[in-house]
Amino acid sequence: MISAELRVDLDRLRRNVRAVRARMAPAELLVVIKDDAYAQGVEPIVTAALDAGAVWFGGIDLPSAVRAKRTAGDRARVLCWMTLAEAEAEAALRSGLEVGVGDADYLDRIARATETTATCARVHLKIDTGLHRNGVRPEAWNAFCARAAALERAGRIRVVGIWTHIAEASDAEDDASRSAFDDAVTAAERAGLDAEVRHLSASAAAWHRPEFRYDLVRIGAFCYGIRSEHGPDIPGVAPISSLVARVTELGDVATVGVGSVDGYPSSAGGRISVATPGGVRQLVRVDPFSSLVELWDGAAIGDEVIMFGPGDAGEPTPTDLGEATGTVGEEPLLRVSPLVPRVYDKGASPSGETPLSR
């Protein structure tokens, strides 16, 4: 008997993606698939999001981006924004990825990679608007754009995007970043660049401030139903994944088969309640290979306990668990060990598939 599994509701993902796309329109949605689609599996996530109309995907790490492009093929564009070594850059271009470039040396590295791959690289130039998470400083932006324009005239690259990351720390700081971004777009146009898309916002800013959406928005957490830390629920969106553990022993408490080695935070013990067949019960302790849960009437070996999920049965959502343990809602998902099986409820899809798959 498998003692724990992460159940991923792909139909719920489709509904989330449709809701986010409707909220962002007319801007297009880029579904973030970093870190193996937040540890939920790139291939099934991309396939389901395509069903829901997604035409852009992206992420930091090259492996997730390559897998997303392999899955989507010509149905979607995929952006990778990690600064890559030359061999990795060549692999990205051969895979058909678009690349985010926030460094002058990296721009030249991409240009060299086009010689080896005989491709024209599709690049998104990144300006640092104050977050200092990569990106060309404003004082170096004009020279950077001039270099990009020269490489574009030489047929080595095509500048298809201008972008940035904002801090999402306060409206005032975000407004300042947006102003700096607009200045950078204007400077790029003066240099002769004509980007197809401008993008600067992620989940929270894009959801709440329409003026930040521009042509494209990069949204990861909200697509997976993960609300912001201490933020409100998101209308039309709910968590797509549930971590379910089975009862393996009974005594004064119920022992369930998931522990800190599986990625469940040990600090959650005594701080949250979980959902059992007998209702909501206190999580007493998290050990390395198992956890102890307050007993309920009629408890039996093999009973299922929901350690986190959409909250329908009273279990914590990923963000609830993150808040209880001093982190963000993405972290409980990302921590789930790859040794914990992923089980996909495919729901209603164009192909008519409905069964659970492992």
Image (cartoon, rainbow, N blue to C red):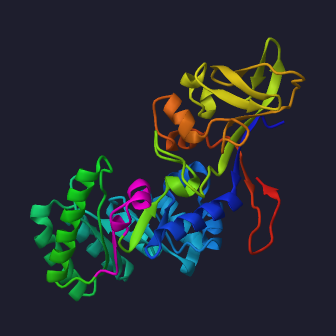
| Residue nearest the observer in this picture, 138 or 288 | 138
- Residue 308's place in the image compared with 173, above or below, is above
Res 73 → quadrant: bottom right
> Would you say 321 lies left or right of 358 here?
left
> Would you say 199 lies left or right of 108 here?
right
> Would you say 90 lies left or right of 308 here?
left
Q: Residue at x 33, y 64 (%)?
A: 200
Q: Where is residue 38 drawn, in percent x and y?
A: 54, 50
Q: Residue at x 14, y 62 (%)?
A: 138
Res 114 → quadrant: bottom left
The answer to whether residue 209 is magenta is yes
Residue 217, can we see it?
yes
- Residue 57's place in the image compared with 133, above or below, is below
* Residue, far top: 252
> Would you say 327 lies left or right of 49 here?
left
Q: Residue at x 64, y 63 (%)?
A: 15
| Residue nearest the observer in this picture, 356 or 322 | 322
Res 123 → quadrant: bottom left
Q: Residue at x 65, y 72 (%)?
A: 51
Q: Where is residue 315 drawn, in percent x and y?
A: 68, 35
Q: Where is residue 64 drawn, in percent x and y?
A: 51, 59
- Residue 88's place in the image compared with 298, above or below, is below
Residue 129, can we see it?
no
Residues in magenta, as a range: 195-213
Quadrant occupied by the N terminus: top right
Question: How many marks on residues?
Answer: 0
| Residue nearest the observer in this picture, 24 or 242 | 24
Q: Where is residue 176 drawn, in percent x and y?
A: 20, 57
The answer to whether residue 283 is magenta is no
